[in-house]
Amino acid sequence: MSILVNRDTRVIVQGITGRDGSFHTGKMLEYGTNVVGGVTPGKGGETVHGDIPVFDTVREAVEQTGADASVIFVPARFAKQALLEASTAPLKLVVCITEGIPTLDVVEAREALIANGTRLIGPNCPGVTSPGACKLGIMPSQIFKPGKIGVMSRSGTLTYEIVSTLSAAGLGQSTCVGIGGDPVIGTRYVDLLSEFEADPNTEAIVMVGEIGGQDEIAAAEFFRQRMTKPIVAFIAGLTAPAGKRMGHAGALVGGEDETAASKIAKLEAAGIPVARLISEVPHLLSLAEKTLVVKVPHRRVAAQRATIAP
Amino acid sequence: MKIHEYQAKQLFREYGIPTTRDILVTTPYEAECVAELMGLPVVLKAQVHSGGRGKAGGVKMACRLDQVAAVAEEMLRLTIKGYPVRKILVCPAVRIESESYLSLLIDRSTSKIVFVGCPQGGMEIEETAQTCPTSILRYEVPAAILGHLTTDECMPFAEQLVDGTSQAEAVARIMVAMGRMFVARDCSLIEINPLVVEERGVVTALDAKVLFDDNALFRHPENAEMRDLSSEDQDELTAKENNVTFIRLSGDIGCMVNGAGLAMGTMDIVKHFGGSPANFLDAGGSSDPNKVLAGLRLITKDPSVRCIFINIFGGITRCDDIAKGILAAKEQFDIPLPIVVRLAGTNCREGQALIAGTDMIVANTLEEGAQCAVRLGNAL
């Protein structure tokens, strides 16, 4: 089990004939992802990677293949159109890898997707992987190991670093989600926390955050009020100077709350241990999981009593 | 991308947002001539890319003509938060009945486009937001209709912002214009603080702050033309031209990393082991050897750099391409500094093999690399 994607997810690739789209479709297929089709306007009728059909429109692709998820590699200037097109098809999930999309385009496309009940991951993200089952996006396959840790991150390469550290320590992952580094994104930490909390195969969560925005703090608040599973965090950017855009458009330190130091303080105050070194993450997880073993059975007993009592 | 107030006000006039009739000057003599034509009193405003200029002496009123040149001269000598004042906007002083705050922005906490208003505008708006959050008005607008709002839709918000029906109608017209401008020019912020009602009841934008979305510059060459190159770091501009992100810091360990998050994480770990990063450099997700070349050129330009730490975790990026880029750079220009290279992920073995026979040091993990770089930096 996992969240968002699994073995049964039927995937189409928008921009499948482009340089990145084509290369990573190959990698996704190697990983075992059920890629059922692709979309490139004007190239409908062709096949790629053996027998994968290419369609002119998303609607056609979904009708013909029964796809329920799409991954988008379309260049930034055409991404809004691709996202709006995806919003008109009955897809459950859209993962947008493209970086550098104008923010207004993202806001508009996000609103259209939400109106149609489609979840958007990204943009400007490395994608979603449920190890051993399904990979949508560009994450390097060799770093993963199936297991019970949920990982969510705003960064790409930093996620790879942390996931490979987890795998090396024998801590496999249920699902790893790169939520994207832009100021406006489709899915935030809190949205994923409720999914991870409900997923029976996820036992603990690693949150990889950075300077800018308030999302890590919102996640801490959600954790304090609504979660039973432990979270361990890592926050990048302790040495970042104020007021500078550090590559990610979202990683601009604004007010006091948005520095790495103040985020770390607030997370720790909410009961989320924060690793100062990436190599500390597995150790903190094992400590957190020990407390979990004590915490969860206790709650289950309480819940059962509650149902028996009346 | 930032622009100056005088540029933002030009845009306001273009889109029908009323402003004062200001004139830009660069010398005290020009300021005096303009003030004489304009009539006194005038307000002189330093044109710099920085907030809080009022408190730094960058906004001054002059009531007599002989004051104008003196005030301008003093202002042109100022440096506000690192930005030297080179241009001054001379504005006619207006008699103010009331002042409020109005902005249109993308709120990242909700991912919505929202008008933000406050009936009490002025320099202390951040403070007001803290002490009296109920006085902050919000009006969320769906992105699809932002470019064609109607005054009717804006009236309920406008009526809360200012007193009087005709004034509220004027504010609603301004909001419609802001929406059109926001879409037409791909802004990420339009801020009017203060938006004033003058003695005669006329509504005017006394100040203007506009930010453009960097991601949308490809479809707005007219936005890019407004960039004030003299206000930006030359190395950061060079980096931008080569599609890498570079920010100079004060330390002595040059860092080159792929990906912004890992780049920050790498700086943090260098600091953790007692070193000090000389820069932030995100070489991005690609194997283009030119980026490696441009990055190393920028790092080695800085005389305080004593060691270079290259940390790559290949996903889209292939480590052997990075290694080839480093070797090409060493061939093209002399790098008299120790280089520590850590390669992981896609094609890391091939990359490490290329580095192995050279004088560069190969590290296996991020922490080992950082420790090694700090040690070598200190040893010099």
Image (cartoon, rainbow, N blue to C red):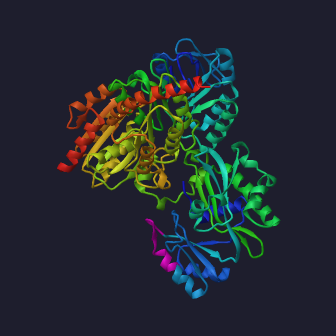
Is residue B179 found inside the magenta-colored segment of the image?
no
- Which residue occupies the foreground of this view, A160 or B259? A160
Q: Quadrant of residue A241?
A: bottom left
Q: Quadrant of residue B92?
A: bottom right
Magenta residues? B72-84
Measured as percent of width and height from the top left, residue B289 is found at 37, 36
Eyeballing the image, is A280 above or below B249? above
Measured as percent of width and height from the top left, residue A138 is found at 47, 28
Q: Residue furthest left?
A: B379
**On the picture, is A175 further left or further right than B378?**
right
The C terminus of chain A lies in which quarter of the figure? top right
**On the picture, is B301 further left or further right than A122?**
left
Measured as percent of width and height from the top left, residue A305 is found at 54, 25
**Residue at horizontal 73 percent and vertical 57 percent from the top:** B175
**Residue at horizontal 57 percent and vertical 57 percent from the top:** B226
Eyeballing the image, is B61 above or below B239? below
**Residue at horizontal 25 percent and vertical 34 percent from the top:** B363
Measured as percent of width and height from the top left, residue A282 is found at 35, 31
Q: Residue furthest front?
A: A309
**Residue at horizontal 70 percent and vertical 34 percent from the top:** A115
**On the picture, is B91 further left or further right than A149?**
right
Q: Which residue lies furthest to the top in this view?
A: A51
Total count of labels: 0
